[in-house]
Image (tube, rainbow, N blue to C red):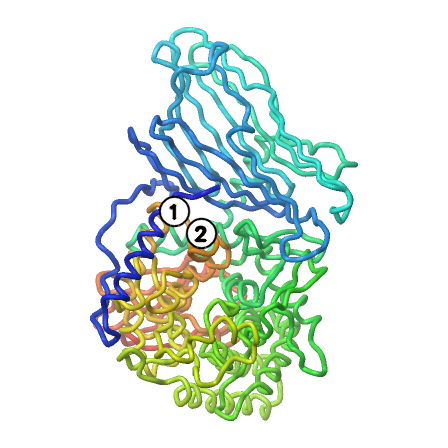
Amino acid sequence: MKSLQTLPALIVSILISLTAAAQTPGPQAAASPSPAQPSRWQITDDGAIVWNVKPDDSHQDNIEMSGKKVSVIVTYGVQTSGTLDLSEFVIFPSFQTLPQDTRSHISEVFADDDSPRILLNGAAPRSSVVERFRQKGVMEIDGHMGRSQERVEWTRKLFPSIDKPAVIETMSFTNKSESNQSVEVEDTAKVIKTSAARGLEGSYVMSSRVLGAGERTLKPGGTTEYAIIFSARRETDTDLPIDPDAELKVRTALVDSYLSKLQLDTPDKVLNTMFAFAKIRTTESIYLTKGGLMHGPGGGRYYAAIWTNDQGEYGPPFFPFLGDATGNLAAENAYRLFATYKNADYKPIPSSIVAEGAATWHGAGDRGDMAMLAYGASRFALASGSEAIAQKEWPLVEWCLEYCKRKVDANGVVESDADELENRFPSGKANLCTSSLYYDALNSAVYLGRELGKPQSQLDQYAAEARALREAIEKYFGAEVEGFHTYRYFDKSVPSVNANALRRHAHYANEPDHLRAWICIPLTVGIFDRAQGTIDALFSPRLWTPDGLATEAGKDVFWDRSTLYALRGVFQEGDTEKALNYLEYYSTRRLLGEHVPYAVEAYPEGNQSHLAAESALYCRIYIEGMFGIRPTGLHSFNCTPRLPKEWNKMALRHIHAFGGDFDLEVSRAGDKLQIQVAEDGKTVKTLEVNDGGTTAINLGEG
């Protein structure tokens, strides 16, 4: 499944390389987000996006959709002739193979050649043209076949079952001619039987089959429907009974339930819509496994497994705000599973728990995993609004903080073997990201411990450690890098303790410091000491590319997660207009451009897969950045809103965090900002702050 995203990404790579070669490192003016680009997709009145196909409009893309027992990456497109390209890469996470590891699940590609032929009046239609693609939790494709005197319009809808190991494709045909027309979908099946020796539960059967295959006569105006089912089963089981109409209804209802909660309401339709789509992607990607509900990255590779960054750091702080039960349960389950690896010797918790909880992966050593877990679990517990959840998460938070404390070196920063990029890029013996996450976790632990009645002496110690760490971050990481008053990501003079990293990055010791995308991390945890220089560096031509931030200046590699963190951090710092400018560009590119409609993982690795937790990070730009929500208790938070100058108001509606269901609306009140909290349509709190000011909001107060 080769995506045509390779070509634009290659162009990006060439531009970055040419830019790096032509420039002498040093402070430079901020890069423009990019020249205006035409959007292939448009937003409809009902919140979907559509691509209305034009003549000679050849293009190919892919999208991932998931249910509790299946995920599918649909590669779709149009040939120059207007005919449809369509294939499905279907993954079945709960059908495990041996040996059990990160990718021990079955999967199969069902390509065009495997599809049943569609006949019009007993023959392949002389003309079959795609007219439109539509996306809103269901992939819908419209077109027609036959010449005018035999014109039949067709619609194909493709989506995963919400609770079965099956993907459903429905096909409907409507006769638009003035005479009877015959439509036939042939009874074509593909069956794959896996090796019994390789399956955890013996042999598995993956198949595609047509429901209702055969020839039907349509009168003028008449409609008929067929379905193709892509499914998996154990060899000893029978094929799943599938009702396509019922499956479509429950899938649509599930998507609507995501969209009804935590609604972004701003004057910018693109931002509102991408926020809505991000909720779908991050929340649908939760799998029911032997180890319980597991939020999984996806991307064709990562299922029935959890990572301390994606499922510890990125996703859980978002889920309470959405209030989806499966999201909250998956977050609780992730921390429960990680907590089983706590130990009296303070050996690191594995980076990943895989194969439905049956195995682990720890190939890069300690990536700062305990800082990730303490950061995510403490924020999740606070936002949950539940004392019961907070009590469950506290022991893990406490253990991880003690682990990090034991890793603080003579410089006062936290050592780790790597960072979450797992030695793809060097991170030395201590990196900026790990120390910043630990700093935030210490502050959250003070808030959380206060709610749980923990000893004041313990909380005072956490606060003192946070203050000392902040000073150490400035002293150790603060630097002039390529002429910018920002941070070095690590000290190259102190080599990594990881032997593989030493071999891979030995040449860095003789190179000057290069800007790194993760210099944005301090902004996201409220450290603004070097904010201006950091923001200038992030948006300089050294780091900013047409696809967001390069991981390292001069390289063609990008990971969306760093761009998403950076945009959040710039809003938090208060450079609102600049943050909005780049956010609007990024959102338009990801939602309406050439590879849509979600945030992506990386390029070239994964070729811009639609990993789920990146969409959670997109939503957090607004929650923590634009609306400036910082949890301070089970029912309280600080709010530092960043209302763009050209907007009169903005709102987050149906926030389910902190034990409530409330709206948060920010509007202009002269030279101040008015913050209104509403429940059930009634205003319960009205506060005013200076533009850039912070106010405390306690939902537990009358």
Tell me the amino acid under the disc marked 2. Asn
Q: Are marks 2 and 1 in contact (CB under 8 Å)?
A: yes
Q: Nearer the viewer, residue 318 or 63?
A: 63
Tell me the element at label 1: loop
Is 252 rendered above or below residue 79?
Answer: below
Q: Residues within 10 Å of mark 1 (few under 14, many from 20)?
A: some
Q: Nearer the viewer, residue 338 or 648?
A: 338
Residue 647: image tag: none
Q: Position of residue 75 (x, y in %)?
A: 47, 39
Chain-order first, disc 2 or disc 1: 1
Tell me the element at label 2: helix
Q: Nearer the viewer, residue 585 or 79?
A: 79
Q: Real-space Cα distance between discs 2 and 1?
A: 7 Å
Residue 627 seen by the camera: no
- The quarter holding residue 399 reads bottom right
Is 531 rendered above or below residue 67?
Answer: below
Residue wearing tag 1:
5
* Residue at the limit of the structure toward the top, as seen here: 179
Q: Position of residue 277 (x, y in %)?
A: 43, 50
**In this picture, residue 422 sits left or right of residue 646:** right
Is 205 rendered above or below residue 94?
Answer: above
**In this picture, residue 395 sits left or right of residue 536:** right
Q: Position of residue 193 (x, y in %)?
A: 71, 36
Residue wearing tag 2:
607
Residue 250 seen by the camera: yes
Which residue is painted at 31% across and 52% down in the image? 11
Tell me the amino acid under the disc marked 1. Gln
**In this picture, residue 66 sits left or right of residue 558:** right
Q: Position of residue 423 (x, y in %)?
A: 51, 70
